[in-house]
Image (cartoon, coloured by chain):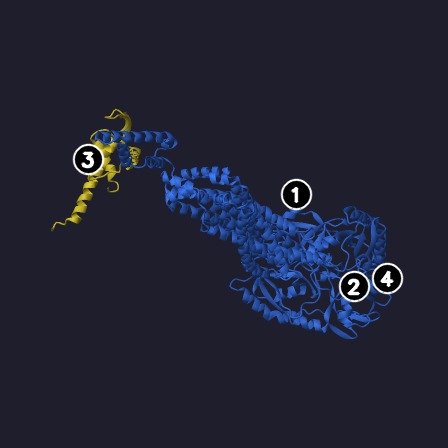
Chain colours: A yellow, B blue
Amino acid sequence: MLQGTLDVLVLKTLALGPAHGHTIAHAIEHRSEDVLQVEHGSLYPALHRLEDRGWIASFWGTSENNRRARYYRLTPKGHSQLEAQTNRWDEIVRAVNRILRPASD
Amino acid sequence: MRLSRFFRRGRWDDERARELDSYLHEEIADNLARGMTLDDARRAAHRKLGNPTLIREEIYTMNSLGFLETLWQDLRYGARLLLRNPTFAVVAILTLALGTGANTAIFQLVDAIRLRTLPVEHPEQLVEVRIVKAPNGRTGQFNGRWPMLSYPLYLKIKEQQQAFTDFIAWGSTNFDLATGGEQRHAEAMWVSGDFFGALGVRPSVGRLLSPSDDVEGCAPSAVLGHAFWQREYGGDPSAVGRTILLDGKRVDIIGVTSAQFYGVDVGRSFDIAVPICSRPAFVPNGGGLGKSDVWFLGGLGRLKPGISLEQAGAQLAGLSKGILEATVSSRYTAADAKNYREMELGTRQASAGISGVRRNYGDSLNILLGVTGVVLLIACANLANLMLARATAREREVAVRLAIGASRRRIVRQMLSESLLIAAIGAAAGVLVAQWFSRALVGFISTDSSPLFIDLSLDWRAFAFTAAVAVSACLLFGLAPALKATHTSLGSAMKAGGRGSTDGRERFGIRRALVVLQVGLSLVLVVGALLFARSLRNLTTLDPGFRQDGIFSAALDLRKANIPEAGMAATQDRILERVRAVPGVRNVTQAFTTPVGGNFWNDRIIVGGVQQKDIANFNQVGPGYFTTLGIRLISGRDIDARDTPQSPKVAVVSESFVKKFLGGRDPLGQAFQVEAPVGDPRPAIQIVGVVADTKYTDLREPFTPLAYLAITQDEHPGPFLQMVIRADSVSSAMTTATTRAITDINPAIAIQYQTMREQIDQSLTRERLMATLSAFFGGLALLIATIGLYGVMSYMVGRRRTEIGVRMALGADAGMVVRMIVREAGMLLVAGLVVGAALSFYAARTAAAFLYELKPSDPLTMAMAMATLASVTLLAGWIPARRAARLPPTVALRED
């Protein structure tokens, strides 16, 4: 996985609604049709970092399996961040594409 | 990062633990739902998540202050480890402190005496002017510590030189501050009027001497040194304007110099400075100011901009002929005058001042610097050994910690911080050792009659250097095994301490090499220590030809007593009589100088009309001198009451004198003449007695031809009387009684005492310094090397316990085990001795100049040193061997 893309993927996942770590990890794998394999362990430091920046917030809740789990949700600051990073991502993809597939092709 | 998180990072970590735990449960539940067995589900979940401890650690560090935080943690951990193993800590820290401390101390001295520039304005411009070529030596009277120029010579150079903006002169002397009785010395300088101005020294109170103070026939005025002013006047500014009593004369105090100025003679300080023009007020015969054969000054010039030392030197060499021609002493004989004209003036670099101390102790300090350097090397080797042992012992611990997920960097850093902790404490202790030690050294060389002044602020550069060497040794050898430990495969490391291992020799390779190095270097130091000690012993046990115990001298200054010249001889006789009557006094006599007393008098003599090539030494003594000093009379008679100013001149001569000048003829009745300045009488002196040889100025010199003239034949005895007294005991009660007897006659007589023992001890200060210090360092090296060997041996024995247990279980007896271990130590010892013998062979040659009747390659010394090392190191091997052999095999086999 590309450096820094994990952050935006987590934000996007949380844009659909609050979730706990386990759900987020599987959701990312699932929605990428298993192309993006997240190392689940590395998710937690990322979550910590995002919370630290105030883009997401956490609370304890109860999971589908009736266990206590730590849930994360997107903050308003996270929303604008997601938008900005998505735009940035599009730019990068376009730029890379321009190089890989020139118009003359 | 929010600061609140930093302080609550412990609770935060708990939450992470629960969060990760909840992940595992979710994942396991999912896996079970997919139909896995519980075990598979667990394993798969763990694999999916990764190492939870590492994840928590990563988040924990995000919450912490990073490096600082873990450093603190590491240091705390290091301190705990050190406290758990205090012997190791103490040995390591002491080794480091002594190694760096001793080195810094000596370097400080070398720096203060040899390297540092004078604390004056632009010291780099200062050059000394002196006679650089004197093919046949200089003749005349030499006074003070640096008698390089005479006053007429100084004035002539000052007049003609073109290379300097200023040309100044100074000489050293002593003043007596007391009003009578036992003397109280102050160190003093004669200075030219422009001395302070040219050096840019500022007054802290009052004013300093200026050229207008130094004019012919001046009234003396005094400038005080800052320390003297603090000591004697408590730093009271009103001291300026008062008077001070110098040799019984009242002199006005005009000012005090700044605190950092101590003069230009490095290693000495001054209490009082007076202008050169005031010398006639203190020294008879006009202070020798008009005589070019009275040498008492040193000259310093400040180079003009753009002129180099060499250019100034060449210029002076060019001026030499004219200057010398203009200043030839009228008292010189034709031969002396010819020698004088052959001399040449030149320059010497003087930015670091001038120093007799440097000349006397420079080489000793260099050798000591080498010695402490070797001590530092041994200390480093020992530290390395200790660190290696420690790191190796922790291999398994490291493996365990790696296995549970610690990062390599973290472990290496932790081991490093432990070494750093030792290094820091050791270095701090080293600073204390250095300060204490360099002061002790200065105290050792300094005496009451010639106090030493050395500015000993801690030299941070030197300390930083030595500390850096020791700390690198610590770190390097602490780090290398740590790195190795983190790279060995976990499995083998975890097994390494297990049973069955005999620990191959190669594992100890570096440590053995280090021990061999330590033994070798220690041998060098022990050889050095023995050489110096045996040389000193040779000097103290040799027969100097005179009695040393129960003898003291009293130097009397009668100038303040106002005794008319006609009554001088009678007064001196009365003093001798009175002292003779003091209870406990056995003999009293007088002499111009006493053996090894620092004063000397030599001249050429004429035998049978022929001037002799060799120079003869002289003394002038009273009746009973030979009995008092226990010098054996071989033939003829002592000087006695028959010898008066009116009777024919007589002398008693030494055996060497007879051999050298009389060629075996019967000496009694023969006569000789002493070469005297032109115009002085040269009476024939008849030899009336022959005595055994004695040492003259120095215990180290061979016996020289010596003639004793009769002091009783002196026509005009001066206001000085040097008494030589033999008493039942030499004590302060004895000198007090003597002082009373003398001051009863006249209270203004100034007296200075010195015992023959002190006199001889002082003449051997350098030898004692070298012997004491090299013994100390040799002992230290031996101790450190022994600790090193002991450490290696007990460690090795510890690692081979199982093997020893097996051997003993199979029938080896205790003796065989001890022999096996001691043989190991013996091999290291022999290797060390071979290395050491080769090294000492070269090292000892540098000390050759310091040895008396001993060759640097003295085989007995080498044998003694080797025997010392062998016995100590074998003991260090035997103790752990004994311990191993006493161990019941069952215990050895069962443990671990």
Alpha carbon separation for disc pair 1 and 2? 53 Å
Alpha carbon separation for disc pair 2 and 3? 116 Å
Using the image, tell me which numbered label, if any, was put on residue A86: none
Q: Are marks 1 and 3 on the same chain?
A: no
Looking at the picture, tell me which residue is in the foreground, B608 or B805.
B805
Q: Are marks 4 and 1 on the same chain?
A: yes
In the picture of the structure, the residue carrying the numbered disc 1 is B234
* Callout 4–callout 1 Cβ contact below 8 Å: no
Mark in front: 1 vs 3: 3
Q: Secondary structure at mark 4?
A: loop
Mark in front: 2 vs 3: 3
Q: Amino acid at mark 3?
A: His
In the picture of the structure, the residue carrying the numbered disc 2 is B692
**Label 3 is found on which chain of the structure?**
A
Using the image, tell me which numbered label, if any, was put on residue B640: 4
Q: Are marks 4 and 3 on the same chain?
A: no
- Left of B242 or right of it: where is B561? right
Mark in front: 1 vs 2: 2
